[in-house]
Structures are given as C-alpha cells and as structure tokens.
Amino acid sequence: MQPKKFNLYNNENQVVQDAYDILTANIHISNEQNRVKTLALTSCNPAEGKTSLAISLSITMANSGWKVLFVDSDMRKPPAAKRLNYGSIFGFSDYLTGDVELDDALSESNIKNLTYFSCGNSHPNPIGLLCSLRFEELKNEVQDKYDFVLFDTPALTSVIDGALIASKVDATILVVKMGLTTLDTLSRVKEQLENVNATILGVVLNKLKKRDYKLYLKSYNYFFNSERFLKIKMPKYQQMLKHHYLVKSV
Amino acid sequence: MNIRQIFYSIVRKWWLIVLLMAAGGGMGFLNSYFTKPLYHSDTKLYIINHVTGGQLFHSSDIDLSQQLVRQYSDIIFSRKVIAVVASDLNHYHLTTDKILSMIKININKDSNILTISAISTDPEVAAAVANATGREFINQIRELTNTDNVGILDYALVPNYSDSKNKVEKVLIGLLLALIVAFSIIYFIEYFDTTVHSVEDIEKGLKLRVIGIIPEHDISY
C-alpha cells in the first residue's frame, strides 16, 4: 500500500462535524441489515461540494469505527488538478486497466480505518473502464474487506460516469447545493438515475447559510457552552470557589 | 411560491430595499432642490354674443357664445397675438416660443368662460403674460370681428404660492416608488428562481428523502 496523508478536510468546526455525524447516523439507520456497502456520491452540477463532502463523510464514518474505503472515481479531471492525488502513483484507473493489483493501488491514510483510492493516471476511455469486468471484481473484493465503500463521481449533467457507477453500486447519495441546483435539473437527474436502476438513498443539502441551517437545527449550539449547565446548578459561592480553584491550579 | 417564502426573500434582500430607497429618496430630494418652483396665474375672459335691441336672451344665443369660445380660442396661439405680447413684455426678454410654451387655455365645457393660464418660475412674469395675452386677444377679436363680444372677467394676480409639490412630498414619492420597484425586483427574482431553497422543496416536489444537511464550512457558532 502507498502511504497517504490527509492534511485537509478534517473539520475543526464543531457545527460542521455535528452535521456530518447526523448524516452518518442517518445512513446507518436507513441501512437495514447492512445491505448497503457501496455508496456513490454524485450531484447534478459540478462544484456543488461533492468531493469535500465525500471526504468529510468518509472521515466521519471512519472515526465512528467503520472500515471505510474512499474511491476517487472521477477520472475526467486532470490528475494534476487534484490536490489529494499528490503522493500516490497508482490508483483507480490503473487498477481497472489491469496494470496493478488492488493492494498496490490503494493508499493508506493517516486517519484510522480510512483507506484512500486515488483516481490514478489519466486514461482516454473512463467509460470503458467502468463497464469492464474488472469493476465488478473490485466491487466484490472490497465488499468483504470494508464496511463502507464511497465512490466520489463526476457530476451527472456533464458526463455519464456518475450514472454508470450509480447503477452498479448499492445506493446513491445525491448532493444538492442550496440555491444553485434547480428543481428541474434535480428531477431530470432523478429520472436518469431511476432509469439505470440506481437506488437513491437520499439527498444531502450542502452549503447551507447559517440562517437556513438554523431553521432545521434551531439549537445546534446548545451543547457548545457547557457553562450553561453548570451555572444553573451551582450556587454562587461554589462558583467562586471553583473559579478560585481553577485560577490557583493554573 | 407562498407568502412565507416571499417574506424571507424580502428580509434577505433588505440591502436592495435600503439601497433603492436611498436612491429614490435622494433623487426626490435633488429634484425638489434643483427645480425652480413654478407659479401659475389665470386670466378669465367671457365671450358673449351681444344681443341687439334689448331683446331677451335665447338659448341659441348662449349656444352661439359657446361656439365662439371654441372658435376664438385658437386665435390666442396665433403668431400675431403672441408677437404683440412679446413686444409688450420686452423688459422680461421673452421669445415667442417661450411664451407659447408658457400659456395654456382652458375652455369650460357648457359655459362661455375662457381661462388663459400662464406658468413661469417667476410669479410676476406668469401674471404679466396671462394679462397681456388676454388683453391682446381681446384687441385681436375686436379688430377681426368689429364686435365687443369678449371682455375680461378676472385679471390675473401675482400668485403667492407655487403650485409645485414641496420637498417632503417629492422625497416621499421617491421613497414610495423605490419601495415598489424593490419589491417587484425581489418578486421577479423569486419568480424565476427555481433553485432548491428548502428541504420541503425536495421532499414534496421530488419525493426524495433528505438524509443530511451540511452547513457552510465556515459557519460560526
């Protein structure tokens, strides 16, 4: 395995981290009897935040204790444009062409339980690769090794890759950016996915502004201020004592 | 599109409303600041078809007077009348075109009264023009028809108040127009915006489940 370090995307913002926890929990709840192993993340338009969402989600899943494989199956972007690819020599496309075996193509990451599969060197015919038997082989092989396999795919309105992958995996998650994706596009994409017999697990609304986010999670910051809980119970002199103690101990 | 959605988008676009209202109010203020107030002065004339020999008025005489009013009124705008008015008032340095643009006549339907209004930024000029035009009109009619049918009922007085709207009124009109424009812009933006704005849009419109809501990564606590 190749070594891989994630410097990015590890959310330090507690609100965002909580949001990903909720998403992970929802995926877990809707996944009865662990039937869903392979997940495709796709969106209608490019730049709706698929890749960052996919990486954050896989990090959150890995932190929850599942063994996660993140597959960058977007073979359209030039490899040089991908920050994450830096450091890995072989990847997804190299495996599909048969140049390398799976163990050599995967990258071990600095996050526990998370394995990274980079998109690999550029290949002229990504559709051919995705239709090959090798893709089925990959699916069968990783299904036993990992709890979740996440495929990050290109946008559905630009190339067919996303629909191809969606038709082959267990479930698909649609990423929708608030205020950018139109309902028309969304319903067309939904139809497209249904036509290829993809299972849509659900929609993730991405990049909500604070005021919109508050509509759905009104008290998202309730637990951030732990003083709130202490103040109610503690009489004033005890607080003073505690403060005194804290100052002293520091 | 429901009322709640429109209300939220109005709240969201508050800056547009403030911007446009500032612009509208400012324009109203500038408009009232830079335009000179207009004064408006009237001369009233009567036209009567004189009855000879002390006979009683007939309704046909009054009809005839009303017809005369309509016929004579065009004479006011003749170059002959205006040229004399201009030379009478040469100390004000008015051209004939200027005088033509200043005066207006108003025929009261079903009466034989003719009102000549003059509008000017100077109240004295307005009154002078109205009076001179009325006087010259009477002279002209006398010359043309050799009758004494037309006379002055009221002389024009120098007006004390301008009839232009005052500053507060203009600013208020500007604000109101800006508000209307802002609301219609917001409404149109909302009307043509078919992007996803809420979880309900997806769940109701597409029958898809929303399994996650992720805020912007730089959301504050």
Image (cartoon, coloured by chain):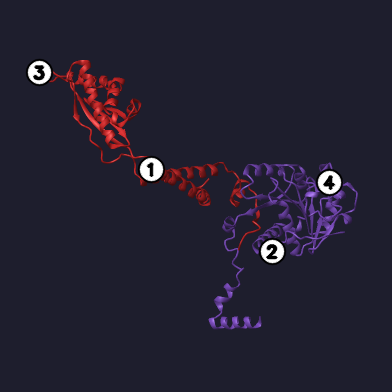
The CA span between labels 3 and 2 is: 108 Å
Q: Residue furthest front?
A: B91
Q: Quadrant of residue A60?
A: bottom right
Question: The residue under label 2 is which amino acid type?
Answer: Glu
Question: Judging from the image, what secondary structure is the residue with disc 3 in?
Answer: loop
Q: Amino acid at mark 3?
A: Gln
Give a yes or no on whether discs 4 and 1 share a subunit: no
Residue A20 visible in the displayed image: yes
Whether residue B108 appears in this view of the structure is: no
Looking at the picture, do discs 3 and 2 lie on one chain?
no
Mark seen at residue B32: 1
For the residue pair A12 and B211, the one nearer the viewer reads as A12
Chain hosting mark 3: B
Residue B55 marker: 3
Q: Residues within 10 Å of mark 1 (few under 14, many from 20)?
A: some
Question: Dot 1 lies on which element?
Answer: helix
Residue B59 location (% of width, % of height) = 17, 20
Q: Are marks 3 and 2 in contact (CB under 8 Å)?
A: no
Q: Earlier in the sequence, mark 4 or mark 2?
A: 2
Q: Circle 4 — which element? A: loop
Q: Nearer the viewer, residue A161 or B58?
A: B58
The amino acid sitting under disc 4 is Ser
Secondary structure under the numbered disc 2 in the rendered image: loop
Q: Position of residue A88 (x, y in %)?
A: 84, 55
| Badge nearest the viewer, 4 or 1 | 1
In the image, B221 versus A223, the foreground residue is: B221
- Looking at the rendered structure, which numbered label has been put on residue A122? 4
Measuring from the top left, give residue B143's x and y in whole percent: 21, 17
Residues behind callouts 1 and 3 on a single chain:
yes
